[in-house]
Amino acid sequence: MIRVMCPACDHYGPPHRPTLDASRCASCGFELLPTLEPGDLDRPQLTRCRFCGHDEMYIQKDFPHWLGLSILLGAVLASFVTYSYHLIAWTWAILLGSAAIDGLLYYFVGNVTLCYRCLSQHRGYPPNPEHQPFELGTFEKYRQERLRRRQQILAEETHSR
């Protein structure tokens, strides 16, 4: 399954099987055109993005960042309260418990593979050892490319009106 981010509005579409057919963004109506080769869809191993055909991809845990940060923030706030009442044992229990929850989530939650260029999310593919964890330098290079593409899309929309 793949979820494609719209380059015009930065919203992810619903998960779907990758195809060579164009689709429309449900949020803004922008036409999403896959730019991959027909043979790319036949490979069981994920070596290239199933939307843009790019080969630089990274892996990350398939877990919402906002939820992880909320758990951390809740644990820190609760530990401040217990520490202010000099309940040191409860403070440590809260902090160590949140670390244990984090470790369990890390162990049980699977990975998702993302494309640096188009940020498409790929799920359900066998792991590829060539795909490494997130690298900020590579991400920044493609972020600049995405920003230029978005400016071009906005300029084309204003000229067509």
Image (spheres, rainbow, N blue to C red):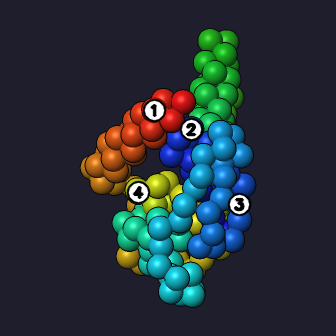
Q: Position of residue 145 (x, y in %)?
A: 33, 47
Q: Identify residue type, mark 3.
A: Pro
- Residue 9's label in the rendered image is 2
- Nearer mark to the viewer, of 3 and 2: 2
Q: Furthest-top residue in view? A: 84
Q: Residue at x 28, y 49 (%)?
A: 141
Q: Position of residue 84 (x, y in %)?
A: 62, 12
- Nearer mark to the viewer, of 4 and 2: 2
Q: Identify residue type, mark 2.
A: Cys
Residue linked to disc 4: 116
Q: Nearer the viewer, residue 151 or 59?
A: 151
Quadrant for the C terminus, please. Answer: top right
Examine the rendered structure and indicate whether residue 135 appears above or below residue 157: below
The Cα–Cα distance between marks 4 and 2, rounded to whole angstroms, is 17 Å
Examine the rendered structure and indicate whether residue 128 appears above or below residue 146: below
The Cα–Cα distance between marks 3 and 2, rounded to whole angstroms, is 17 Å
Judge from the rendering whether residue 52 lies leftward or rightward of residue 71; answer left or right. Answer: left
Q: Give the class, few, some or many, for how many residues have Cα within 10 Å of label 1's Cα (few <14, many ≥20).
A: few
Q: Residue at x 66, y 52 (%)?
A: 24
Q: Which numbered disc flags the more N-terminal residue, 4 or 2?
A: 2
Residue linked to disc 1: 159
Q: Which numbered disc flags the more N-terminal residue, 4 or 3?
A: 3
Q: Which numbered disc flags the more N-terminal residue, 1 or 4?
A: 4
The Cα–Cα distance between marks 4 and 3, rounded to whole angstroms, is 18 Å
Residue linked to disc 3: 15
Element assignment for label 1: helix
